[in-house]
Structure formats: C-alpha cells, structure tokens
Image (spheres, helix red, strand yellow):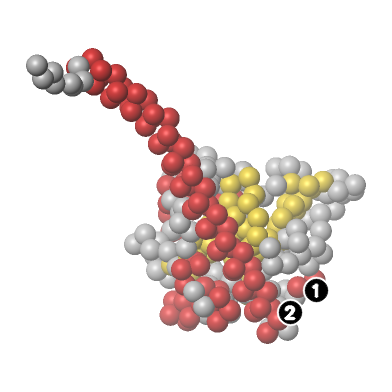
Amino acid sequence: MHIRKAFTLIELLVVIAIIAILAAILFPVFAQAKEAAKQTACLSNTKQIAIGQLLYSNDADDMVIPSNTVNDVPGGDVPLASLADQLTYSWVNTIQPYVKNTNLLFCPTFDESKLKHAMDDAACDGSGATNSFDPNLLPSDNKFLSNYGVAKNAQYYTCAPGQTTDSSPYAHYPGSGYTFDWNSGKILQQWLSLSSVVESARTANIGDAYTAVSGDKSYVVTKFGCEAQYRHKSDGGDFSFLDGHSKYLHGNPEKLHTTDSQCVFETYFSYDR
C-alpha cells in the first residue's frame, strides 16, 4: 500500500509563522545595512569633495573655494548678479575640474523631509514649529544643485571674554566669496586663505545640507551647518574639512567649545579660534 507523505495544516502554519518571525527580525537588519552603505557612499563623496577643494586651493593661491564668485546674496547695496551668472560661478561648477563627477554632489540618503525638520529647529532656520523656516530658502521645483552646502565667510557675535554664551556662541565660517557681514550690515566680497585657518583638521567648510535655486528663482542659496543634523540615521551629517579629510558629526554639527578665557565658539565652524 502506497502512503502519500504531506505536511499537515498545523505544520504548514508553524513553518509560515517561523518564516514570518525570521523576516521580522532580519528585514530591519537589512534596512540598517542598506542605510549604512548609503551613509558610507555619502561620506566617500565628502572625502572626494574635500580633496577637490584642496586641489582648487593649490591652483588659486591658497584661497578657500568660494561659494560663488558673483553676488548671490539678496539685499544690501551690492547688485545681485543674474541667476545665470550665479549658476555658472557657483561652487558646484567651480569644483568640477577637480572632481570630474557631478554625481559626487548628491547624497544617496538625502531626504527633504529630514532637511525641513532640521531647518525648522529654533537653533537653525526656524522657530521650532513645523514649516517655520523661510520657504524661499528651498527650491520651488524640488530640484537641488547639490545635497551639500559650502560655507560663506560669515561672522556671528564677538569672542571677547564673557560676551558669548551657549545661546549666542561666536562663529566665523571658513569660506570665500560674497556674504552678508553681520557686523557692518553690508554685503561684502571676502577671500580666505588656507594659511589663515588656525586648525585646518578641525575646520569644516563643506557638508551635508544643500545648494539650490531659491524658491523665487532669483538667487542661488547654499546652506551649511545645522541643516545636516538629521541626514543620517536622524542623528548627524558628513562634513569635508580643510585638511582634506571628511568626518561624520553626530547631532547638530554646530557643537560648542569654551576657551580658558570663557569664550564660547562653534568648534568646527570658527576658523580663527
């Protein structure tokens, strides 16, 4: 007598349950591994950008790569360059002869919702409320020139003893090109040499954020700093440093340091401290 062997319904349900349990355990691990791989790719991009901007400095008499060599800062008494010229002379094009790869300008883990969340922060571009940042800072067509931003030579507050606190730290961003000078209230063209940087291995000038055409399509906006704080695993961003290395910074990259004279300054964004 031939007896057919087969699984009972209970046995099939047990097997299905085991597979479901294994899937529930393994799928998040696979997702984390995929995210880690994308973060590594993004970090690699910032490393190559860091080397590219060093090569630029070698050809430009030691000058830190400018965000733009025409005025891309609206307001003030300096005429705003045409959008076409701003695009032509933006850092995203200036760096291309040295990296020769436009894909390097885009991060695989870029998520606009995380960017907006960071910009809403009261310590960033907003008030803490949802969509509290200026909507004109983002492109109206959701198209970005780069998922990275470059520093402008902007200075905030002073660094005299007792004049800065954790809520208003001194910062002097390491950049070149046109910028709004908070001390004079004017738009200035400023150039920074690498030799002026106190500690290039500690000073970042390019990192996770973005470069794009403004919402009203009148100027090129580039953001650098706090906008990176949720890029990877909702816990930080990648940055290129002026000595040619790149590094992942946890949380808000505008971390603070206090000197012996009690000057509070932004650790990675104050090139003259």
Which SS class for mark 1? helix
In the image, what residue occupies the spot 72% across and 74% down? 192
Which SS class for mark 2? loop
Q: Residue furthest right?
A: 260
Q: Residue furthest front?
A: 1
**Measured along the vertical axis of the image, is residue 27 above or below residue 71?**
above
Residue 68 is drawn in which quadrant?
Answer: bottom right
Q: Which residue is mark 1?
A: 195
**Measured along the vertical axis of the image, is residue 53 above or below residue 214?**
below
Give the number of marks: 2
In the image, what residue occupies the spot 61% across and 74% down? 52
Residue type (three-letter) at the residue carrying disc 2: Asp
What mark, if any, has residue 265 been given in the picture? Answer: none
What mark, if any, has residue 62 been given in the picture? Answer: 2
Residue 94 drawn at (x, y percent): 55, 79
Quadrant that contains the C terminus: bottom right
In the image, what residue occupies the spot 21% across and 20% down? 7
In the visual, does 117 lie left or right of 183? left
Residue type (three-letter) at the residue carrying disc 1: Ser
Looking at the image, is mark 2 or mark 1 earlier in the sequence? 2
Nearer to the camera, 31 or 63: 31
In the visual, does 166 lie left or right of 48? right
Residue 24 drawn at (x, y percent): 38, 29
Residue 42 drawn at (x, y percent): 53, 58
Alpha carbons under labels 2 and 1: distance apart: 7 Å
